[in-house]
Amino acid sequence: MSGQASTTTQRYRLSTNSSTDYYSVYGMPGVVGIGVSGGKQRLSRWKLCVLTVILMMGSMTSAHSQSDEDQAENVEELRAQRREVHADRLANAKAVDVETAAIEDLNEALSTFQQWINNQQLVVEIARAEAQSAQQARDEALADVAILSQQLQRLEDQIRESAVRSFVEGDPVAVLLESGDPTVSIRRESLVQHLYIGNDDLRDELRRSREELIVGEQRVILASEVAEEKRLDAEEHYRVLVGDSARYQTLLSKSEVRLETLLFERQTLVELDQSISSQLTAAEGQLATLLGTSGFSGGSGGGPGETVSPADVVDVGYGVEVHRDIAENVRTLLAAARLDGVNLAGGGYRDAAAQIRVRRNNCGTSDFAIYEMSPSKCRPPTARPGTSMHEQGRAIDFTYNGALITSRSGAGWEWLETNASSYGLFNLPYEPWHFSTSGS
């Protein structure tokens, strides 16, 4: 007993002593049976450990949360940078000058534009699907409102039927209302209130139906706003697609003209300069491939073109044959250049019959294949007859000292750049050697 009393006394002292730790006596693991002073020290260390663990867990959670936020910000930043790069590339593609751009830059513009059009078509499809889904949600909300309105109407009909029965059956309250109240609206409201008091379920159901109807009408308003927003969004995306598709078709058309001129020149330049290869470069081949896979049907072919009879072709010297209309100007140009010490020569008129034979071999034997089909769809790519100023005798490919003028530098180019326009000849921007009466 004395031991029990001692323990009881100790517990009492511990529980009443604010400076003594209760847990040193009442069952904390590892501290039972330890004295007050030792228990306090052991408990302090235990508390410190627990506090440390809690702080570490909080720090880890906070760090993990911060890491997720940083990662999300980094992803969004990368997406924004990618969108900016794509926007810059598209702007460059729209601004490219087909006549003066390097073939590599033209290929880049076509690839960028084609990718953009494909992406924009997908955006339009998604926007239209979202608009359709939003419209469907609006229709469903309207249908729900119609059902709720019918339910509300049914409940109100039940109330009116109850009112009629009250009158017919001689309900004292109804009779009193009918005979004593001079205001019809007040009588009706009083009767309804009387019926409500007598039918709690009907009253609750009517209240719920009205609340649900309000919510349903709000859903209709919201769904209508979303549907209209999605519809306008889809229309805007489609408008952008239509505009950019038109620009893309223009770029394709101009690029095909560039390719066609290049192909025609490539076939005959070897006659002027043996160092010129008849094979397309990798960039030129890529241009033909891009045009061939773009879905572009090709512009209108030259057809038979202007007929140039042998009598219309004049040899002005130095291997140059041109149409008689410009013969005197070209003859004078060549003479003036030689007086300045610049030995120009070149090739002018080319017989369209030869080009027709090449097209028949590379493209097909039908009139469409020969005259109309896109050059990029032939194997190998081949220019259409009737599309070159050479076939009209109104273009010249100049050589200087027997070599084709392939750069915008040197005595031959500099003399032509300064003087050719005085004789009615203008340079094709992407071919330094090619001059014609139209610059094409």
Image: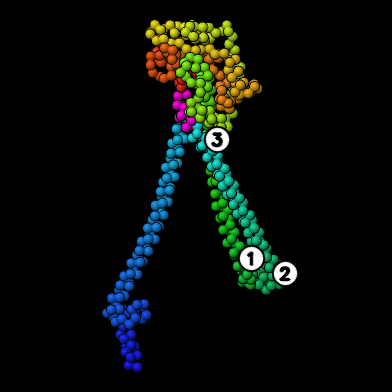
- Mark 1, residue position: 188
Amino acid carrying mark 2 in the image:
Val
Q: Is residue 103 above or below residue 179?
A: above
Count of numbered circles in the view:
3
Q: Is residue 106 on the magenta stretch? A: yes
Separation of residues labelled 2 and 1 (CA atoms): 15 Å
Q: Which residue is nearer to you in this view: 87 or 154?
A: 87
Which residue is found at the position 64% from the left and 61% from the top? 152
Q: Residues within 10 Å of mark 1 (few under 14, many from 20)?
A: some
Can residue 99 be seen here?
yes
* Circle nearer the N terminus (2, 1): 2
* Circle nearer the N terminus (1, 3): 1
Q: Left or right: where does residue 381 sit relative to residue 160?
A: left
Q: Is residue 187 on the magenta stretch? A: no
* Circle nearer the N terminus (2, 3): 2
- Mark 3, residue position: 242
Which residue is found at the position 40% from the left and 14% from the top? 412
Which residue is found at the position 52% from the left and 40% from the top? 119
Which residue is found at the position 48% from the left and 28% from the top? 283
Q: Is residue 424 above or below residue 364?
A: above
Q: Which residue is nearer to you in this view: 383 or 249?
A: 383
Q: Position of residue 221 (x, y in %)?
A: 56, 52
